[in-house]
Amino acid sequence: MSIAWLNVQSLRNKTNAVQQTIGKRSIDVLALSETWHSSSDDMCLRVSAPPGYAVADAARTTGRGGGVAIVYRQHLKCSMLPMPECRSLEVICVRLVTTSGPVVIMKMYRPGSEKPSSLFFEELTNLLETMVVYSCPVHGDRWGFQPAGSRRQRP
């Protein structure tokens, strides 16, 4: 499985570049930060996903900029994983089921314009502890997995 990360600093004028990068490099999963999208219905998210791909996202709900998204091959079964609420960073976490088994992918973004605070380190610790729990082999229903698209709010 090919997984990549990209800070797009506004997806609006880069949808073609993102699509071409995915295709040219045969990327299965692309995690995006600073998408600057305002909602899950934002057209730039849909246009940036090549045919055969889907998008899970978390838009920044206040202010300008921010936003994170994960573009993934549609044949991978995707579930959004609940994460602790964060105020100092943005996060999205998904569980993708592949032919080799499940993979958990978490994308975090902390605005670089802000100095890391004690709140940031507390929230980061909570997120990493949550990832340890998700990496344990348990039944998905126990952790409240939801199909991508069924929960479209910022964690």
Image (cartoon, rainbow, N blue to C red):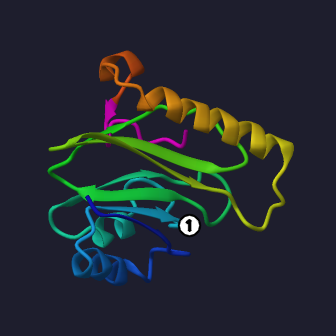
Q: Main secondary structure of the magenta part?
A: loop
User: Above or below — where is 42 with respect to 74?
Assistant: below
Residue 44 quadrant = bottom left
User: Which residues are drawn in magenta?
Assistant: 146-155
Left or right side of 62 for 45: left
Q: In the rendering, at what x and y percent does residue 26 appear?
A: 22, 72
User: Above or below — where is 55 with respect to 4?
Assistant: above
Left or right side of 139 for 85: right
Q: In the rendering, at what x and y percent does residue 123 appear?
A: 70, 38
The answer to which of 133 and 36 lies nearer the viewer is 133
Residue 120 quadrant = top right
User: Above or below — where is 45 with respect to 22?
Assistant: above
User: Which residue does the numbered mark 1 point to in the structure image?
Assistant: 34
Q: Is residue 152 covered in magenta?
A: yes
Q: Secondary structure at mark 1?
A: loop
> As shown in the figure, which amino acid type bears the numbered disc 1?
Glu
The answer to which of 121 and 7 lies nearer the viewer is 121
Q: Residue at x 37, y 15 (%)?
A: 142
